[in-house]
C-alpha cells in the first residue's frame, strides 16, 4: 500500500465575533474550510500560512500564535482500485488580518472566502478541520491538542 504524507498550515482568524473561512472545492463538493494549505518542499510552515491566506483570501496576516497540530490518517482509494494510507499533519496558527482586501482565489482549491458569525458555523457545510481549529482557539490547550 502506498503511503503519503501531507504537511499543511492553516490560519484561525477571528475578529468581531466572526471567523474567516475559504470555500474548498473538489469536483461538485463545496465545503467551508480554514484558509491554508500544503507546504512546498523546503518552505517554513509559518511562511506557508502567510502565503496560503493571501492566495485564498487576499488578506495579509500576522501570526499571533501556534495553537496546535492536527494529525489524521485515513485510507484513500486511488486509480485502478488501489488504496493509499494518507497521513495529513496540519499546523494550526492564530492570525490577525493586517492588510489587503477580501477577494476570491481564481484557479485554486478554493473559490471564495467570507467572514462568518461564530454562532453560524455549526450550520455551515464545512470540513472537520474548522471545528478542530475553533476548539484549539477556544480551549488553548498547552499540549496543542484538544482534550478528549
Image (tube, rainbow, N blue to C red):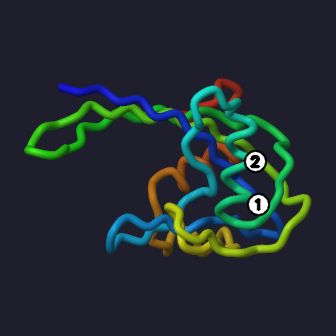
Query: Given the current orientation, which residue lies at the most extreme left position?
Result: 81
Query: Given the current orientation, which residue lies at the most extreme right position?
Result: 98
For the question of whether residue 56 can be seen, the reply is yes
Q: Name the residue at 63% across, 65% down.
A: 21
Indicate the position of residue 15 as horizontal and vertical percent values: 82, 64
Q: Which residue is mark 2?
A: 50
Instruction: State the image quarter where residue 43 is shown.
Output: top right
For the question of whether residue 139 can be seen, the reply is no
**Could you classify mark 2 by the number of other residues whose Cα lies within 10 Å: few (under 14), some (14-19), or many (20 or more)?**
many
Indicate the position of residue 22 as horizontal and vertical percent values: 59, 66
Q: Is residue 133 above or below residue 70?
A: below
Quarter of the picture containing the N terminus is top left
Q: Name the residue at 74% across, 36% down.
A: 46
Q: Name the residue at 76% across, 60% down.
A: 14
Q: Name the residue at 83% across, 57% down.
A: 60
For residue 14, the mark is 1
Image-based side of 119 in relation to 51, left or right: left
Q: Is residue 8 above or below residue 116?
A: above
Q: Secondary structure at mark 2?
A: helix
Image-based side of 21 in relation to 4, left or right: right
Q: Is residue 12 above or below residue 90?
A: below
* In front: label 2 or label 1: 2
**Could you classify mark 1 by the number of other residues whose Cα lies within 10 Å: few (under 14), some (14-19), or many (20 or more)?**
many
Amino acid at each position: 500500500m502506498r503511503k503519503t504524507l501531507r504537511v499543511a498550515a492553516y490560519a484561525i482568524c477571528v475578529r468581531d465575533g466572526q471567523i474567516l473561512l475559504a470555500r474548498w472545492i473538489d469536483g461538485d463538493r463545496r465545503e467551508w474550510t480554514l484558509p491554508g494549505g500544503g507546504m512546498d518542499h523546503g518552505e517554513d510552515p509559518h511562511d506557508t500560512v502567510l502565503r496560503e491566506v493571501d492566495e485564498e483570501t487576499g488578506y495579509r496576516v500576522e501570526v499571533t500564535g501556534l495553537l496546535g497540530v492536527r494529525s489524521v490518517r485515513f485510507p484513500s482509494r486511488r486509480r485502478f482500485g488501489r488504496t493509499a494510507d494518507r497521513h495529513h499533519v496540519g499546523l494550526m496558527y492564530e492570525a490577525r488580518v493586517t492588510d489587503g482586501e477580501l477577494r476570491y482565489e481564481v484557479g485554486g482549491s478554493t473559490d471564495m472566502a467570507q467572514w462568518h458569525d461564530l454562532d453560524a458555523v455549526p450550520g455551515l457545510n464545512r470540513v472537520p478541520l474548522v471545528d478542530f481549529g475553533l476548539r484549539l482557539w477556544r480551549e488553548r490547550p498547552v499540549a496543542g491538542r484538544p482534550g478528549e
